[in-house]
Amino acid sequence: MNALGIAWLHFRLGAMNELQYRANLVIQVFQSLLQLGIGLVMLALVYSHTTNLNGWSQPELLAVLGIQILMGGVIRTAIQPNMTRLMEEVQDGKLDHALAKPVDSQVLISVREVRIWQAVDLVTGAVVLGVALVRLGGDLGMLNVLAFAAALVLGAVMIYSFWLVLTTAAFWVVRMDNVLDLFDGVYQTGRWPVGIYPSWLRFGVTFLVPVAFAVTVPAEAVTSRLEWQTLLLAAIFAVALFTFTRWFWRFGLRNYTGASA
Amino acid sequence: MSTFSVAQPGRPRALVDFYLTAMRTAVQAQLQYRVNNYFWMLGWVAEPVIYLVVWTTVAEQSGGSVDGNTAGYFAAYYIVWTLVRNMNFGLSTYAWEWRIREGILSGQLLRPLHPIHYDLAFFAGWKFVAIFLWIPIAVALSLLFEPTLDPSVLEIVVFAVAIWGAYLIRSLNLWALGTVNFWTTRGAALSELYIVVELLLSGRLVPLQLLPAWAQTLAGLLPFKWTFYFPIEALIGDLSRAELAKGLAMQVFWTAVGTALVAVMWRRGIRRYSAVNG
C-alpha cells in the first residue's frame, strides 16, 4: 500500500468518525467567527490611527489575516492532531503499535488523525482572503497565483517539519505538552507581516518557527510584492528542513527504547 | 448543605492557616515543572509582544506617538501587562467542564470548605512561582523595548494591592462562569465569548484610551478594566490620588459583586448537580 493510499484511508476514517459529532461544527463556526472578529477589530483600531503599517495598506493586511486563518486551519485539521497524538503515545508507551506496522512509520504517524471541523477555518480564511483581494482590485495575474499556491504548500511543509522535529524531541524529553501553547502563541505573530518585527524576532519567526514562510510569503505573492529570490529561498529551506526532519525522525527512532518494553 | 457555606464564621484563623498551607503546596508543586511552565509563559508572552510591536510601529510612523502615547509608553504598558496577566490568570472554565465530566467535583464536595477556597489558594500560591519565573522575561523585554517607567512610591504600593484585586475579581468571575457548566455541557462557548469581550474592553488588547469613546464608556460600566487597565495605569500612568483611590474602591465593589455571583450560582448549581447525579 502506498503512502497516499494510507493517508486517504485514514482521512476517510477520521472524517466518518468526526461526522458523528455534528454539533461540533456549530461550535467551530462560532469560535472561528470570534477569532475573526478580534482580528478585524484590531485591524480597524490600527488603521484608525494610521493609513499604512510599514508599507502595508488595510486591505493588504486583511489578506495577511485571511492567509493566517487559512494556514491555521490546515495546521489544526491535519498537522497538530497527529503531533499531539504522537506526543501522548510516546508518553504512554503506545507508539510501539504504530512502529510494528509494515509501512513507513513517518507516513503513518503523520496521517492518522484528521479534525475535519477545524477545516471551518479554511473556509473563513479563504473568504477573508477573497474579500481582501476584491478590495485590492488589481488583477493578480497567473504568475502571482502560481507563486501564491507554491508558497502556501512550501509553508505547510515547513510547519509540518517544524512540528515533527519538535515532537520527535519527545523521545528524549518525554513531557512537553505545553509546546502546543508555545506554538499557538508564536503563530499569532503571523497576523502581521514579519517586516514590522525587530530583527531578532523576525529571525525567530522565519527560521526557528517558520511562520513568516507560511503566512507572510504567500501574502507577498497575492499583494504583488514577492521577489523570486524569496520564493527560491522558501523552496530551498523547505527541502532542507524536510530532509533534516526525515533524518531526525529516524535518528529519534533508533534512540527510542519504548516506554512499555 | 450548610457545610459548603463560604468562610465558616468563628474560624478565620483556621482559614488563614489553610490558605498559607495550600499556597506553599502550590509553590512546591509548580516549581517541579519549571520547563513546562516556561514553554507556557513564552507562548503567552508572544501576545503582548505582538501588540507592542504593532503600536510601536504605528507610533513611529505617526511622528513618534499615537494620540500622545509614545513608543516608550507602549513598551511600559505591555511589559507591566505581562506581570498583570501573570497575576490575574485563574481556574479556566475548561477545568470546570472537566471536573464535572470526570466526577472530580463530587470528591471536592466532601471537603469541609467551600471549593472556591481551594482554587483561590492554589492559584495564589502559583503566583509566587509565576512571578519568580517572570523576572528574567521582564528584564529581557525591558532591555529590548526601553519602557518609560517612573512610578512614585504611592503608585507602586497601589499597584501591589491592585494586582491582587485584579486576581480576585477575575478569579471570582471566571469561577461564576464555570458554574454555568452545571446547566450545560457547552459552557465553553459562553466563556469564549466572555474572553473576547474582556480582551477588547479590559485594556488587554490595547490601552483603553485608543478605543472609540463609546467603547470607553462601555468599558467603564464593566468589571474588566479593573483587572487589566487600572493596575497597569496605576503604575505607569499619571493618575491622581483620587483616581487611585477610586480605582481601588471599584475593585472592592467588583470583588463584592463577584463574591455574590459565586455564592448565588454555586447554591443553585449544586442543587442541579445533585439532581443530575442522583
Image (spheres, rainbow, N blue to C red):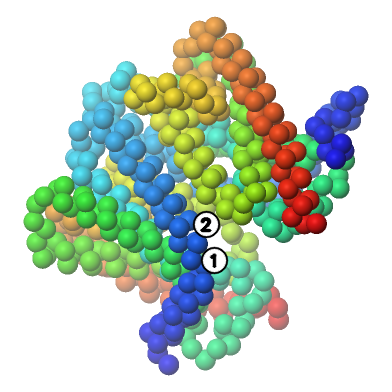
Considering only order in the chain, which callout, 2 or 1, is on the residue closer to the N terminus? 1
Q: Residues within 10 Å of mark 1 (few under 14, many from 20)?
A: some
Q: Amino acid at mark 2?
A: Leu
Question: Cα distance, mark 1 to mark 2?
Answer: 8 Å
Q: Secondary structure at mark 1?
A: helix
Q: Which residue is mark 2?
A: A180
Residue located at (80% from left, 32% from top): B6
Identify which residue is drawn at 23% across, 30% down: A50
Location of residue A82 in the rendering, given as x and y in whole percent from the top left corner: 50, 70
Residue B216: quadrant of the picture: top left
Q: Report whether B3 appears left or right of A196.
A: right
Specify the label residue A15 is tagged with.
none
Quick check: A259 above or below B126?
A: below
Q: Is residue B256 left or right of residue B191?
A: right
Which quadrant of the view contains residue A208? bottom left
* Chain of the residue under label 1: A
Residue A9's x, y, as percent? 44, 84
Disc 1 to disc 2: CB gap under 8 Å:
yes
Residue B80 coordinates in the image, percent (x, y) = 51, 28
At horizontal 27% and vertical 23% (from top left) the residue drawn is: B64
Residue with the mark numbered 1: A84
Within the image, what quadrant is residue A212 found in?
Answer: bottom left
Q: Using the image as rendered, state which of residue A6 and residue B196 is in the foreground.
A: B196
In what quadrant of the picture does the C terminus of chain A appear? bottom right
**For the residue marked with disc 1, what is the amino acid?**
Thr
Q: Numbered disc 2: what chain?
A: A
Judge left or right: residue A48 versus residue A25. Answer: left
Residue A169 in the image, given as x and y percentages of width and height: 54, 66
A171 and A116: which one is in front? Answer: A116
Q: Quadrant of the N terminus of chain A?
A: bottom left
Q: Is residue B138 above or below residue B37?
A: above
